[in-house]
Image: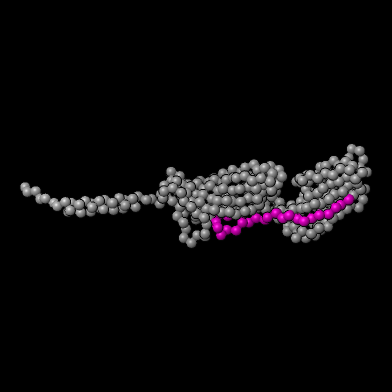
Amino acid sequence: MRSTLIPSTTRARRAAAVTALLGATVLATAACNDEDGTATPVSGAPATSVTATGAPGSAAQATVRTVGKTGWFEGFEITVDKATVAPDAYGGAKVLIDITYKNTTLDNKTMSNNTSLLVGSEVDGGASWDNPTVPGNGSAKGTVTTPVKSAKEAERLLDTMTVVYGQAADNQTKIPLAAAGQVESVAPKTLPVTGTLVQDQTTIEVTGGKLAPSYARNEHGKYELALRIRISGGPGIAAGGTNIFTEYFSVRTPDGQTVVADDRGQINELLDAGKTIDNPKNYVVFVVPAPATGEYVLSYSNQKAEAATTAPTLAFTVH
């Protein structure tokens, strides 16, 4: 057998061709093995802030949507900051919703369990809530977490979700994760109400007010009208002082009802002669019907009905 000598230049060209063929094969194989385990943006989806981390197709990839929507419930200003869909190593995924709770009251508070996560029109029974205890006038982070079958079409999934506070019989707050979704919530109002009521040796000074929906259960369509008061005692108050209680206050509502102050605003003070009680927590609270706007008349009387003198009054308007 004769051996055929191949010139070195020919060998180099053949080696380059083999290398190129192998490279193309590797790329083709990689493309075939790239399974779709990631969130795919929906065509025509509303503009949202979406980022991904990790290598494409890996379990580390996540879709993050900035939400930035605010509502109010139970004395909290609630902001849904963002929602994350994170795949796991087993083909499933979880949704994590980050929420900031700003406590607008003076007391430490924790959001109640009167909450739900809607997916479409159905309540997600697998959602778990981490609601922090928030100091008065402070803020803290909370979360809602729920497992989902897959991270595919993550944006479409997030568009179906709504964070809900309250039930249908309550004054609900609804915060949708979809960019186009509108928050359903009523912001509290600060009321510029001031005035003075004097009865005998007791002076009641109204220094301000606020109006917000009632978030008590089964009070849909009702509001809480809260008036901040300062109490002063005259020199003629007998030794031992005189009591000032919640039930001494009432309002006549725009529709003509007389509403006695509710115990959710506790007034229980012992007033001495020459003293002033200026407790920042002293709000007289009235539960009034919606829309809660119009002309009101506040009355104060510590006399028994059968021996009552004329009760002092203060008229004011809620716009």
Q: Which residues are magenta?
A: 176-198
Residue 94 visible in the shown view: yes
Quadrant holding the C terminus: bottom right
Q: Is residue 195 magenta?
A: yes
Identify the residue at horizontal 14%, vertical 52% (top origin): 7
Which residue appears farthest toward the front when viewing the image?
8
Q: Is residue 239 left or right of residue 35?
A: right
Identify the residue at horizontal 46%, vertical 56% (top origin): 41
- Magenta portion: prevailing SS class: loop
Rendering coords of residue 250 (x, y %): 82, 51
Looking at the picture, tell me which residue is in the foreground, 73 or 82: 82
Q: Is residue 180 magenta?
A: yes
Which residue appears farthest toward the top when viewing the image?
240
Residue 306 visible in the shown view: no
Looking at the picture, tell me which residue is in the foreground, 48 or 12: 12
Total numbered labels placed on residues in the image: 0
Rendering coords of residue 269 (x, y %): 83, 42
Which residue appears farthest toward the left when viewing the image?
1
Q: Is residue 107 left or right of residue 64?
A: right
Q: Is residue 107 left or right of residue 196?
A: left
Rendering coords of residue 59 (x, y %): 43, 46
Vertically, is 253 above or below 272? below
Identify the residue at horizontal 85%, vertical 40% (top origin): 270
Identify the residue at horizontal 65%, vertical 50% (top origin): 77
- Structure colour scheme: one colour
Rendering coords of residue 193 (x, y %): 79, 55
